[in-house]
């Protein structure tokens, strides 16, 4: 799964919530997401900025779901989890034993943990709390270029 596919599988409600959090906690990324969506719509950014948040989120989700938007989609997801949901990201990284500094991986291409321990950690992480960002985090994590973990990919495919 790639980052654009994460956006294409995202529900409208989840996109609206995510954009709302980005608007509140990282206004620069929020504006960047709107500008990217405006470009995809061939509209002026001001037009999209005047729309209700639900319409903005719908436009961003549609724009980021395009193959050509994979890099921008990846950046939005990274900023969302590094800046807005860092505690969740750190919980995941700690549960699988990946070395990181405040959510930023120390290794460029982290090796996949042992299959059984990865499955156990992922299932425990997903079932810990009813939080829509948990499966989103795992999908975004698996979508990174530096993460090539077939076991996580297959686990996510089974759950969807």
Image: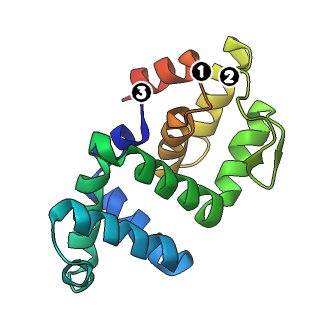
Residue 154 vs residue 1, the one in the foreground? 1
Residue at mark 2: 118
Label 1 sits on residue: 149
Question: Where is residue 82, by image quadrant?
Answer: bottom right
Q: For the point 34% across and 38% down, which residue is it?
A: 5
Which one is closest to the eye, mark 2 or mark 1? 1
The image quadrant of residue 46 is bottom left
- Tell me which label, 1 or 3, sits earlier in the chain: 1
Indicate the quadrant containing the N terminus: top left, top right, bottom left or bottom right. top left
Q: Is residue 118 left or right of residue 24?
A: right
In the rendered structure, which disc, 2 or 1, sits on the residue that comes first in sequence?
A: 2
The secondary element bearing badge 3 is classed as: helix
- How many numbered markers are drawn? 3
Label number found at residue 137? none
- Camera-side residue of 42 and 37: 42
How packed mark 1 is, by other alpha carbons closer than 10 Å (few <14, some 14-19, many 20 or more), is some
Residue corresponding to mark 3: 159
Whole-angstrom CA distance, mark 2 to mark 1, is: 10 Å
Question: Badges 2 and 1: C-beta atoms under 8 Å apart?
Answer: yes
Q: Is residue 85 above or below residue 90?
A: below
What percent of the width, then of the height, locates residue 57? 29, 66
- Mark 2 lies on a secondary structure that is helix
Local crowd size for mark 3, using a 10 Å CA cut-off: few (<14), some (14–19), many (≥20): few
Q: What is the x, y in percent for residue 85?
A: 61, 60
Q: Residue at image x 65%, y 53%?
A: 88
The span from disc 1 to disc 3 (Cα, nearest Å) is 16 Å
The numbered mark, 3 or 2, whose residue comes first in the sequence reads 2
């Amino acid at each position: 799964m790639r980052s654009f596919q994460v956006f294409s599988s995202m529900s409208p409600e989840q996109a609206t919530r995510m954009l709302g959090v980005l608007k509140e906690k990282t206004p620069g990324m929020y504006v960047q997401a709107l500008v990217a969506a405006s470009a995809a719509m061939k509209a002026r950014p001001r037009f999209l900025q005047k729309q209700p948040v639900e319409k903005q989120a719908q436009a961003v989700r549609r724009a980021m779901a395009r193959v050509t938007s994979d890099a921008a989609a990846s950046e939005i997801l990274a900023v969302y989890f590094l800046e807005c949901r860092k505690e969740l990201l750190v919980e995941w990284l700690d549960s699988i034993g990946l070395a990181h500094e405040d959510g930023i991986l120390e290794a460029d291409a982290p090796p996949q943990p042992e299959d059984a321990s990865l499955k156990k950690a992922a299932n425990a992480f997903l079932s810990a709390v009813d939080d829509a960002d948990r499966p989103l985090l795992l999908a975004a994590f698996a979508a990174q270029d530096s993460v090539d973990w077939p076991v996580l990919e297959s686990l996510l495919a089974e759950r969807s």
